[in-house]
Amino acid sequence: MEMLEFTKGKKGFFQSYAVEVDVKDASNATCLYAQWMMSFLIKYETNSSDYKNATLSLSSNVTHDGSICGNDTQAALLAVQFGEGHSWSVNFTKTNETYQADFITFTYNTNDTAVFPDAKRKGPITIVVKDTMHPVQLNNVFVCHNTDSIEAENVTQFFWNLTLQAFVQNGTIGEKESRCDADTPTSAPTVLPTDANITTASTTTLSPAPTTVPKPVENPDTGNYSLKSGNKTCLLATVGLQLNVSQDKPLLININPKTTSADGTCGNTAATLRLNDGNSRFIDFTFVVKNASANVRRFYLKEVNVTLLNHINGSVILSADNNNFSKWDASLGSSYMCRKEQTLEINEGLQIHTFNLRIQPFLVKENKFSTAQECSLDDDTILIPIVVGAALAGLIVIIVIAYIIGRRKSYAGYQTL
C-alpha cells in the first residue's frame, strides 16, 4: 500500500511524496511496516567537466518490489523503486531483543535527463552506506519526525517523518514508540494556561520590562577542512563562514566548524568542497582551472551552492546558487589567502561572508598549504604610498596658502598719514 502526498511545488523546493509500505507474509499478516519521506541531493559531473547539483525525490509511481519479511536467519528488506530507474533499499537484522537497520543501498540513473541533464557518466550508479539507526526493541515502533541525513560519494540522503517496524509479530504493529535522538526534547515543554493554573491578576501596577537590545552577531569561528583522494590530501581550506539570509527578515547565521563535516570531489581541472554544518545547512564551493597563458595556469572559485532545510520536516527553506563567480584567483600550485572579510553575493536573498580565508583546491603537497597569494584587502603595503601622497598633498596646500597670504601683505600699498 502506498500513500502519496505532495508536499512542495514551488520552484527550487524539493517535491517529495510520503510513502507507506505494508509488507505481508504468506498468511497475509503484516511483517514489515514503514512510512517515511526522503529526498536526495546529488552532485554529478557534466560533459564540460563542471559539477552540478541535482535534487531527486520520490515520484508518484513508487513500487516496492523485492521487499521481504525476514526471520531469525534472514534479514528483512525494505525496497522501493521510483522515477526513471532509481531505487532505494535498507535491510534489517535482529537479535533476541532488538532489530536495527544495517545498510542502505541507493541507485540513481543518470540516463534520467530530466534530473541529470548533460551528465558525463551515463547509466545506473549505486552507493552503499551504513545506516546510523540505533537498535530498537522488538515490538517497538521506531519514530523520527525530524530530518536525518547521510552523506557518501557525492550523495546526501534526507529522511523525515519516519515510522517503521521490522519483524512485526503476529501481524500487529506495536503500540510503544522508540524515538530518535533528534526527536527527544531538550527542554521542558511550554505549559499552556488552563482553568486549573490561571490565577487572578494582581492590582499592583508593574513597571514595564526593560527593552533588551539584541546582541550583535560575532564573527564566526575559523574552521579547518580537507579532502583526500585515497591516502593523499587533495584540497585544504581554512575559513570562517557567515550566512546573511534576507528572504523574510535579515538573519545572520554563523557556521560552527565544530559540527561541520567536509565532503566533495577532487580533480585535475575541477574540485568541489561540500560543507554540512550538522544543522541542515549545506554549502558547496566549486573551483576550476583556467589557462591564463601558454605557460601560466590559475584556479578560481566558479560556483557556490547553498541549501537550507527545515530540520523538522525536511522541506527546503532556501536553495540558491551562483555559477558565474570569478573570485579567489591564484596560480595553480599556490594557495589563496584573504584574512579580511569578503562577501560572496549568491542572489538577492543570500550572501556569504568569509573570514580568515585560505584555500588550495589543487596540487596540495605534504598536507600543507603552498605559498599564498594574498588578496588586495590584506596588502597593507599599498597604504604607505597613499599615506605619503596624502601628506605631500596636504603640505603643498599649506605652502600655497602661505604664499598667497604673503603676496597679499606685499601689495597692501601706502597707508594714509
Image: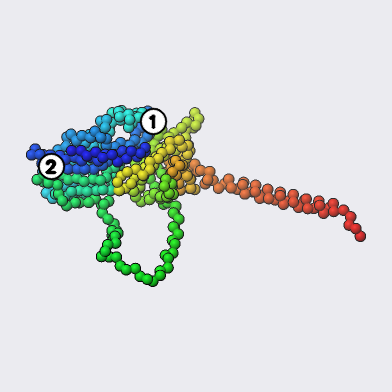
Q: On the picture, is 252 further left or further right than 23?
A: right
**Residue 66 figure quarter:** top left
Frontmost residue, 299 versus 213: 213
Q: Position of residue 39 (x, y in %)?
A: 29, 39
Q: Residue at x 34, y 45 (%)?
A: 309
Q: Which residue is drawn at 19% across and 45% down?
A: 164
Q: Is mark 2 on a helix, strand or loop?
A: strand
Q: Mark 1 points at which residue?
A: 49
Q: On the picture, is 69 further left or further right than 121?
A: left
Q: Which residue is drawn at 41% across and 52% down?
A: 221
Q: Residue at x 44, y 54 (%)?
A: 217
Q: Is mark 1 on a helix, strand or loop?
A: loop
Frontmost residue, 368 versus 330: 330
Q: In this view, does 225 lie above or below 271?
A: below
Q: Label 2 is placed on what type of residue?
A: Thr
Please tell me the numbered disc located at residue 190: none
Q: Can residue 32 be seen in this view?
A: yes
Q: On the picture, is 246 further left or further right than 262?
A: right
Q: Mark 2 points at which residue?
A: 30
- Asked if the residue at tag 1 contacts the one at tag 2, i.e. Cβ–Cβ closer than 8 Å, the answer is no
Q: Position of residue 321 (x, y in %)?
A: 41, 38
Mark 2, other Cα within 10 Å: few <14 / some 14–19 / many ≥20: many
How far is the residue under mark 2 from the one under mark 1? 48 Å
Q: Position of residue 72 (x, y in %)?
A: 10, 43
Q: Can residue 230 be seen in this view?
A: no
Q: Label 1 is placed on what type of residue?
A: Ser
Which quadrant holds the C terminus?
A: bottom right
Q: Where is residue 165 in the image (x, y as percent from the top left)?
A: 17, 45
Q: Is residue 290 above or below residue 307?
A: above
Which quadrant holds the N terminus?
A: top left
Question: How many tags in the picture?
Answer: 2
